[in-house]
Amino acid sequence: MNSIDLQYQELLRHILEHGTVKGDRTGIGTRSVFGVTVRHNMSEGFPLLTTKKMYWRGIVTELLWFLRGDTNIKFLIDNDCHIWDGDAYKNYKTKTEIMMGHGFHGTLLSQEEFINKIKTDDEFANKWGDLGPIYGKQWRNWEHYDEIGQHYSSETQKIEESAILRRQPIDQIANLINDLRTNPDSRRLMVNAWNVGELDQMTLPPCHYGFQLYTREMGLEERCLYWADRHKKDKSFTRNMTHEMLDAVHCPKRKISLIWNQRSADVFLGLPFNIASYGLLLHILAELVGMVPDQLIGNIGDAHIYLNHEEGAREQLTRDPYELPQLNINTEWWQTESGECGIGPFDVDAFLAGLQSEHFNGCLMEEDIQLGNYQSHPSIKAQLNN
């Protein structure tokens, strides 16, 4: 069953027929509606749209980039992912033109020259490739300051009162995984990217600004059906199974769901990407905590189709969906070959450290995050509006 493609097509149709035409920061113009929810049962298959061919490698690369805590596009460019090129170049072009207006004697690079220099010149990449404190920074390194009430003064040789601030970075992803393991019924299983104090430093404020997890215990019948399906057995095979027997064969006890919130969605190009990205994140988190992916839900504020995407949207509405693909993850992929990042595939420290290790180059996804039986209609070309 493929209800996600049908939901998506219905959203395209609704916006085209009932959307309000509005101006926007790109100057292109949009047709938009406000307040949309998409919902997918992960047991139906992986939510990668089939009514047009999707850029799967880019989806995987960007999510790994976020999880690394990275904010520089060099990692993306080195892995042939160019979805953030326009935002980085726009930032470079604007600032360079301002400097040139103040007497700076330099050359304004074209976007192609800019991207090539990011790839080949580390110093240039460090200066111009960073997008500010966007998703990866907030997910892995949210800045928090503790006030130190006392300190030792070398001048007076005494302990004195003070208001010295000490930076305490917060790794929201590590905390989330720890809470999922130790307190899975918590209502605080959340990650936030909307850091109001740092919005003005971001090249683009977060569109999908936060997500929340929810877990629940599976009943005996549900666990039996899951185990039978996973091992390609007839459900009658599990007729006499008990919870203790399922525990002994390491059958998961819980299902896990994810809901994300999005202030703005480019429905034709961006939303299909977001759906698949959060579906992949849900799968990865489920693997890390030994649970089964359940519901994937997206809440969207301004859902819009750019006016220069309307023709492509109408073409997509003429297509019948195929069956959804399946996703398989090799859970040992987050260990380095030397084994120095951890001792087991479900070790969160191994996972997070492995992403940031010098051994990790982002090229593991093709063999370790595998998409099976993906059949789709051809891609529909459209301009990415920055």
Image (spheres, rainbow, N blue to C red):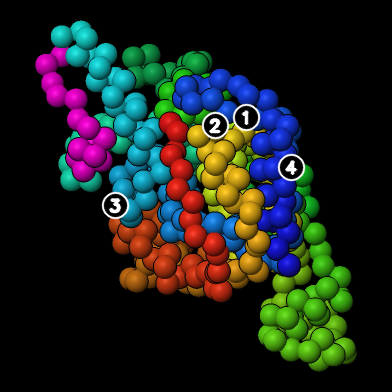
Residue picked out by circle 2: 307
Q: Residue at x 80, y 59 (%)?
A: 216
Q: Residue 31: which disc? A: 1
Given this view, does label 3 or label 1 mark the residue nearer the observer?
1
Q: Position of residue 323 (x, y in %)?
A: 65, 69
Q: Position of residue 196 (x, y in %)?
A: 56, 23
At label 1, counting other C-alpha atoms closer than 10 Å, the crowd grade (few under 14, some 14-19, many 20 or more) is many
Q: Residue 78: which disc? A: 3
Q: Are marks 2 and 3 in contact (CB under 8 Å)?
A: no
- Residue type, label 1: Arg
How far is the residue under mark 2 from the one under mark 3?
32 Å
Q: Are marks 2 and 1 in contact (CB under 8 Å)?
A: yes
How far is the residue under mark 4 from the one under mark 2?
22 Å
How far is the residue under mark 3 from the one under mark 1?
35 Å
Task: Indicate which disc, 4 or 1, sits on the residue closer to the N terminus.
Answer: 1
How far is the residue under mark 4 from the one under mark 3?
35 Å
- Residue type, label 2: Leu
Q: Nearer the viewer, residue 148 or 204?
A: 204
- Residue type, label 4: Thr
Tell me if residue 143 comes above or below residue 39 in the rendering.
Answer: above
Q: Nearer the viewer, residue 347 or 33?
A: 33
Task: Indicate which disc, 4 or 3, sits on the residue closer to the N terminus.
Answer: 4
Q: Quadrant of the N terminus?
A: bottom right
How far is the residue under mark 4 from the one under mark 1?
17 Å
Range covered by the magenta-colored residues? 104-117
Q: Position of residue 122 (x, y in %)?
A: 20, 41
How far is the residue under mark 2 from the one under mark 1?
7 Å
| Tally of numbered discs | 4
